[in-house]
Image (cartoon, rainbow, N blue to C red):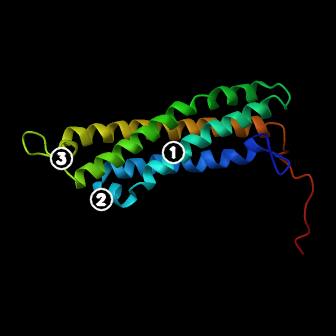
């Protein structure tokens, strides 16, 4: 995907990533903290994470096309380098969202082990899922911020003036 309605696709697709990845991270942490939240989100959690995951390589691919169609610039190169690092975080979000969803399902339909306790409702498993979710969610959100900041600098570094070039009549 290169152009959408005459605009570089990256410029439009980036909004999906900027919204969906942090939203997925927030939903994941909420579901990992609260079984009730996980049950209420249900299959929506891993589906949201899947859409986020798919949006990352689409946006990256469109960004690579755009990079070949703009003037060489160190800021653009830095943005592209950072952008390549988001996919592992998106994969982590998807895997953990699927795991948290599965754990919440398994907790409502317990399959006891030999001791009669539900395996997936064990506290160590939930704590491990929570810790991993916090780490991956934080990493993904920080990475989206860093990538977005570098992209904004690359796009706008000489594209505006501190002083207004014209004024509107306020009358």
Res 21 visible? no
In what element is the residue under mark 2? helix
Q: Residue at x 67, y 44 (%)?
A: 14
| Separation of residues labelled 3 and 2 (CA atoms) | 19 Å
In what element is the residue under mark 3? loop
**In the rendering, at what x and y percent does residue 100 appear?**
34, 45
- Relative side of 5 to 97, left or right: right
In primary-sequence order, the first of circles 3 and 2 is 2
What is the quadrant of the C terminus in the image?
bottom right
Q: Which mark is residue 50?
A: 1
| Separation of residues labelled 2 and 1 (CA atoms) | 21 Å
| Residue projecting furthest to the bottom | 171
Which residue is under mark 2? 36
Which residue is under mark 3? 111
- Relative side of 5 to 60, left or right: right
Nearer the viewer's eye, disc 3 or disc 1? 3
What is the quadrant of the N terminus in the image?
top right
In what element is the residue under mark 1? helix
Q: Residue at x 67, y 35 (%)?
A: 60
**In the rendering, at what x and y percent does residue 64 appear?**
74, 31
Task: Write down the quadrant of residue 83 in the picture.
Answer: top right
- Circle 3 packing at 10 Å, graded few (<14), some (14-19), many (20+), is some
Q: Residue at x 69, y 46 (%)?
A: 13
| Residue projecting furthest to the left | 115
């Amino acid at each position: 995907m290169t152009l959408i309605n005459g605009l570089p696709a990256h410029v439009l697709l980036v909004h999906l990533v900027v919204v969906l990845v942090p939203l997925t991270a927030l939903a994941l942490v909420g579901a990992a903290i609260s079984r009730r939240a996980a049950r209420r989100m249900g299959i929506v959690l891993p589906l949201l994470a899947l859409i986020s995951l798919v949006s990352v390589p689409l946006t990256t691919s469109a960004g690579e096309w755009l990079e070949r169609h703009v003037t060489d610039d160190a800021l653009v190169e830095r943005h592209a380098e950072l952008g390549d690092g988001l996919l592992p975080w998106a994969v982590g979000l998807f895997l953990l969202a699927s795991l948290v969803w599965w754990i919440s399902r398994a907790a409502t339909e317990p399959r006891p082990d030999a001791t009669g306790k539900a395996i997936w409702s064990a506290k160590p498993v939930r704590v491990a899922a929570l810790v991993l979710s916090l780490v991956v969610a934080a990493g993904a959100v920080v990475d989206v911020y860093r990538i977005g900041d570098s992209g904004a600098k690359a796009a706008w570094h000489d594209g505006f003036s501190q002083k207004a070039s014209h004024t509107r009549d306020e009358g």
